[in-house]
Image: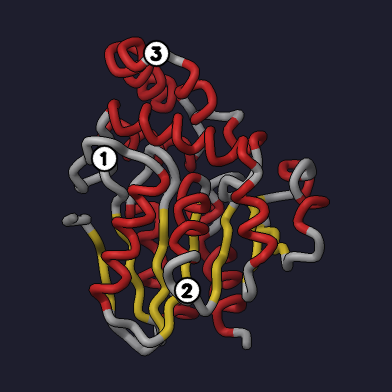
Amino acid sequence: MNLAATQRRSGDHLIVFMHGIGCAKESYAEAFDAAELKDFSLCAFDFPGHGESLSLRENSVEAYADASVELIDSMGARRVSVVAHSMGGAVGLLVAQKVDLAWFVNVEGNLVAEDCALVSGKTARMSFDMFTTTGFYRFAERLKQSPRKDVQAWAQWYPRCDPAAIHQISQSLVEWSDSGRLLEMFLAMDNKAYVYGGEEERVEYLLPMLKGVPAYSVPDSGHFAMVDNPAGFYDAIAAIVSSE
């Protein structure tokens, strides 16, 4: 498996960034300029069927996790932390079952069924033929019409994806989120944190389920906190992964 990645080796502690559905490694472009992370090795990569990475025959949360583990193992880092956004949160949880992580940071990552309401749930309910011939392109056009900074960034990444991969990973993501297993795995982990954009109202359905998990709000941001407020986002990430 060859994954397109941007890497920097700066220390023994590697932070691996995992992006959301229809996104790309460029979600985390500003991590490489963040002063707070200058002493960390960094890796941001494109999941299969996203960005510059080739699609798989079958795109699933499990397959993406296996590809991620291969990449992490190839880097030979002594310490590894994962920062995983949206869909990447589900993938990262499966990675954490196979890799001994220093920290797992869930950035509004999929944990429960409600996390699929915005995009993946609607995509999964479409037939494969309808989505790959019509739905994918209509959604790409809708993204371009948004005046929001974060959605405009998404509008650049989404058309680069393989429509078949988006449909397949959406179905897998919905299945995992509906199962309840993602939340169980997250709560069972050590050294974990939850990061979300803006006020608590946006994730009020989830916060009571986290049962004491440290949660950090990034001000002046929405679902794409790393795009809306990169300074605040990477301040929070550095504080989390630097703690003992």
Instruction: Identify the image's colour scheme: rainbow, by chain, secondary structure or one colour.
Output: secondary structure
Tell me where residue 121 appears, x and y as whole percent: 54, 26
Q: Is residue 223 left or right of residue 49?
A: right
- Residue located at (59% from left, 65% from top): 232
Along the polypeptide, which appears first: circle 2 or circle 3?
2
Query: Mark 1 and mark 3: span between their CA atoms?
Result: 19 Å
Q: Quick one: SS at disc 1?
A: loop
- Residue located at (37% from left, 89% from top): 12
The residue that disc 2 covers is 81
Instruction: Locate residue 127: give its quadrant.
Output: top left
The residue that disc 3 covers is 127
Query: Mark 2 and mark 3: span between their CA atoms?
Result: 37 Å
Task: Classify mark 3: residues with Cα within 10 Å, few (<14), some (14-19) or many (20+).
Answer: few
- Residue located at (35% from left, 80% from top): 41
Contact between labelled residues 1 and 2, with CB atoms less than 8 Å apart: no
Q: Amino acid at mark 1?
A: Gly
Task: Classify mark 2: residues with Cα within 10 Å, few (<14), some (14-19) or many (20+).
Answer: many
Instruction: Locate residue 240: give its quadrant.
Output: bottom right
